[in-house]
Image (cartoon, rainbow, N blue to C red):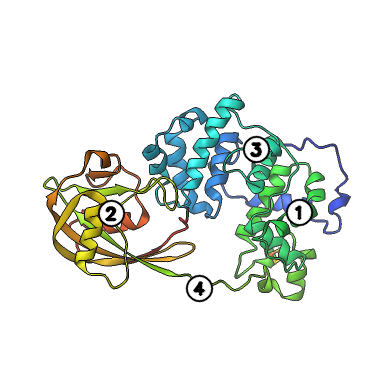
């Protein structure tokens, strides 16, 4: 999308004289992506939300499934919870999906079902912060606003030897201010932003930057001084705590498994998981059984340990001890039926990653699950 700003001399970027080289490099080397090339604002918006904290190659299949299920803003606005979360299952940060739906409802109510072009209108929508607003407005509407994501911060912390912590809003805003004259003079702000992000992803990688192929190399201070891997500067990460939980794989006579829906507010809200929950590390099987009885109304019998799963979230590690069991007595109370359900496998309900891993083995009749996984799903 061509720039809408009045013409500004490229001299503003002349101190690094590389805007043109950057755009030439990008147009020759950019990766094909389903949301590129035809900047439909809805597709760009969905892709930018999915790309938060997530790599391009991970996002591709999720984007395809989500857009096939919700091809329009109106279809997204009307999505029921399970239908909304199922194509997002495994992508993490589920609040993003719920905010997309909320924002789609606002767009129908106040913006005739279309994304607005200005930064102020975009940042007023649920789930859209300065970064996403800058990306959508520059790519789709030609607004000259720099994006500052992790890739951009890595490139320019090296380029200018900036020691700031770019996870904080202040340094990110200061870097955007520093880049604004350059994007204003470049002629295509969407390509400018995407070029820097692409360069950060393809060349200026965290551990082995390919400086010899980089169009910014002639003026890059880190490359000049051999200090690429000293930037960006990151404070030491704190050790993450560990929590313990139990999960029960119940089967009924029709070989269905019992699932429980998490509260819609909070961690992994609205997703379905195995019955159970957090419990002290040194628990007895009887205490675990009591937990399930209180949660579902069903009393387990023939408890058998079935392995364990370790699942790492962004801010804690979960050790999930699994049991297989049959139902000895009890029934699901009518008041619980919207959140305790028997499901065939594979389930069409949106599952937590831990439940998916546990049931992947349960589905083919194996027991003794043992494994680990890592998730971005913190919300
Ligand atoms: S020259 Fe190297 S360190 Fe500098 S921006 Fe390019 S890839 Fe990154």
Q: Are marks 2 and 3 in contact (CB under 8 Å)?
A: no
Give the residue number, with chain letter if any, for mark 3. 122
For label 4, the SS is loop
Q: Could you tell me which residue is drawn at 41 percent across and 45 percent down?
A: 264
User: Which one is earlier in the sequence, the residue at label 2 or at label 3?
Assistant: 3
Give the residue number, with chain letter if any, for mark 1. 21
Q: Nearer the viewer, mark 3 or mark 1?
A: 3
Other-residue count near label 1 (Cα within 10 Å), few / some / many at <14 / 14–19 / ≥20:
few
User: Which one is earlier in the sequence, the residue at label 4 or at label 3?
Assistant: 3
Q: Nearer the viewer, mark 4 or mark 3?
A: 4
Percent of width and height locating residue 340:
26, 45
Q: Could you tell me which residue is drawn at 86 percent across and 39 percent down?
A: 7
User: Which one is earlier in the sequence, the residue at label 1 or at label 4?
Assistant: 1
Give the residue number, with chain letter if any, for mark 4. 239
Give the residue number, with chain letter if any, for mark 2. 274
Other-residue count near label 4 (Cα within 10 Å), few / some / many at <14 / 14–19 / ≥20:
few
For label 1, the SS is helix
Q: Are marks 2 and 1 in contact (CB under 8 Å)?
A: no
Is the residue at mark 4 in contact range of ligand 1, meaning its CB lies under 8 Å from it? no
Q: Nearer the viewer, mark 2 or mark 1?
A: 2
Of residues 290 and 235, the one drawn nearer to the viewer in this rendering? 290
User: Alpha carbon of mark 3 to alpha carbon of mark 1: how far?
Assistant: 31 Å
Q: Are marks 2 and 4 in contact (CB under 8 Å)?
A: no
User: Which one is earlier in the sequence, the residue at label 2 or at label 1?
Assistant: 1
Percent of width and height locating residue 361:
24, 59
User: Alpha carbon of mark 1 to alpha carbon of mark 4: how far?
Assistant: 42 Å
**Residue 210 in the image: above or below residue 17:** below
Q: Could you tell me which residue is drawn at 66 percent across and 60 percent down?
A: 168
Percent of width and height locating residue 104:
53, 33
User: Alpha carbon of mark 2 to alpha carbon of mark 3: how far?
Assistant: 38 Å
Of residues 305 and 283, the one drawn nearer to the viewer in this rendering? 283
Which quadrant does ligand 1 occupy? bottom right
């Amino acid at each position: 999308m061509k720039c809408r700003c009045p013409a500004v001399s490229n001299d503003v970027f002349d101190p690094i004289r590389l805007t043109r080289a950057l755009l030439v490099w990008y147009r020759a080397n950019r990766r094909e992506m389903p949301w590129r090339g035809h900047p439909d604002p809805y597709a760009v918006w969905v892709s930018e939300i999915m790309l938060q904290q997530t790599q391009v190659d991970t996002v591709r299949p999720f984007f395809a499934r989500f857009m096939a299920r919700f091809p329009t803003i109106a279809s997204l606005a009307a999505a029921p919870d399970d239908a909304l979360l199922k194509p997002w299952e495994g992508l993490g940060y589920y609040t993003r999906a719920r905010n997309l739906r909320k924002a789609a409802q606002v767009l129908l109510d106040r913006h005739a079902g279309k994304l607005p072009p200005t930064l102020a209108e975009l940042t007023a929508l649920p789930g859209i912060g300065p970064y996403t607003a800058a990306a959508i407005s520059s790519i789709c509407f030609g607004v000259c606003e720099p994006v500052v994501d992790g890739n951009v911060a890595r490139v320019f912390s090296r380029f200018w030897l900036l020691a700031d912590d770019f996870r904080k809003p202040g340094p990110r805003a200061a870097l955007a201010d520093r880049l604004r004259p350059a994007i204003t003079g470049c002629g295509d702000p969407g390509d400018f932003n995407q070029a820097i992000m692409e360069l950060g992803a393809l060349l200026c990688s965290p551990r082995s930057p390919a400086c010899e192929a980089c169009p910014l190399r002639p003026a890059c201070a880190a490359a000049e001084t051999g200090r690429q891997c000293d930037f960006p500067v990151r404070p030491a990460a704190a050790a993450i705590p560990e929590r313990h939980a139990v999960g029960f794989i119940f089967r009924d006579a029709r070989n269905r498994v019992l699932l429980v829906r998490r509260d819609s507010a909070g961690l992994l809200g609205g997703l379905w998981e195995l019955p159970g929950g957090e419990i002290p590390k040194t628990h007895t099987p009887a205490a675990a059984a009591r937990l399930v009885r209180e949660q579902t109304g069903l009393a387990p019998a023939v408890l058998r340990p079935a392995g364990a799963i370790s699942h790492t979230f962004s801010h804690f590690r979960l050790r999930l001890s699994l049991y297989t069991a049959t139902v000895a007595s009890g029934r699901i109370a009518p008041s619980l039926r919207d959140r305790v359900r028997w499901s065939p496998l594979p389930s069409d309900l949106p599952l937590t990653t831990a439940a998916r891993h546990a049931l992947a083995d349960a589905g083919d009749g194996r027991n003794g699950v043992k494994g680990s996984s890592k998730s971005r799903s913190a919300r």
